Amino acid sequence: MSRVLIVEDPLTVMQLSGPLMDIPDLEFDVFSDGREAMDRVSIAPGTFDLVAVGDGVSGMALIECVAYLRRMFRELLIVVLVSEDTEDQILELNTHGIRRAHVLVKPTTPDRFSELIAGMLEEDRRKTVEKRKRKQEGKQHPPNGNVQ
């Protein structure tokens, strides 16, 4: 089961979230206040597999939310929703590890939003499986060549 936190204004969430309900094994929580959302993430680290945060949040600026999330959770998947993608904003997001491919300009389509989230979660699952497999292979064949 994957869990997503969406931090954005209620109207945008209503417009974009429909197709998310069709993704199997996906639950999502919604906050419109950035500070409340960051408090929620802090209280229960590891609860969310992905956070989608937009520039329509109240209580905390978008870049503050992203910086906080990245500082606290280096591996957390983050999608960013912006009203416009100026070069300065993209560069600033990039300094916090947000790739251009993970930034959506509003208005975006609900399908594009859900496809990006589903794709990122699937890629993360694949990487996790590969890590576990390599780790397991390492236990079976230690570096000195002895089999355990």
Image: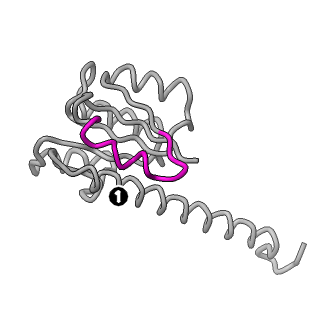
Rendered position, 119 above or below 145? above
Between residues 50 and 17, which one lies in front from this camera angle? 17
Q: Which amino acid does label 1 sit on?
A: Glu
Q: In this view, does 34 lie to the left or right of 132?
A: left
Residue 98, position in %: x, y? Answer: 31, 50
Rendered position, 59 above or below 83? above
Q: Quadrant of residue 83?
A: top left
Rendered position, 14 above or below 16? above
Residue 8, position in %: x, y? Answer: 28, 32
Residue 15, position in %: x, y? Answer: 24, 39
Q: Quadrant of the C terminus?
A: bottom right
SS type, badge 1: helix
Between residues 6 and 141, which one lies in front from this camera angle? 6
Between residues 148 and 128, which one lies in front from this camera angle? 128
Q: In which quarter of the image is residue 50?
A: top left
Q: How crowded is mark 1: few (under 14 residues within 10 Å), some or many (20 or more)?
A: some
Q: Which residue is drawn at 43% across and 51% down?
A: 22
Q: Residue at x 55, y 59 (%)?
A: 125
Region rendered in magenta: 13-27
Q: Residue at x 22, y 31 (%)?
A: 11
Residue 46 within the magenta-colored segment of the rendering: no
- The kind of secondary structure the magenta stretch mainly shows is helix
Residue that protrudes farthest toward the right in the picture: 148
Q: Dot 1 corresponds to which residue?
A: 115
Q: Residue at x 58, y 47 (%)?
A: 1
Residue 126, position in %: x, y? Answer: 54, 65
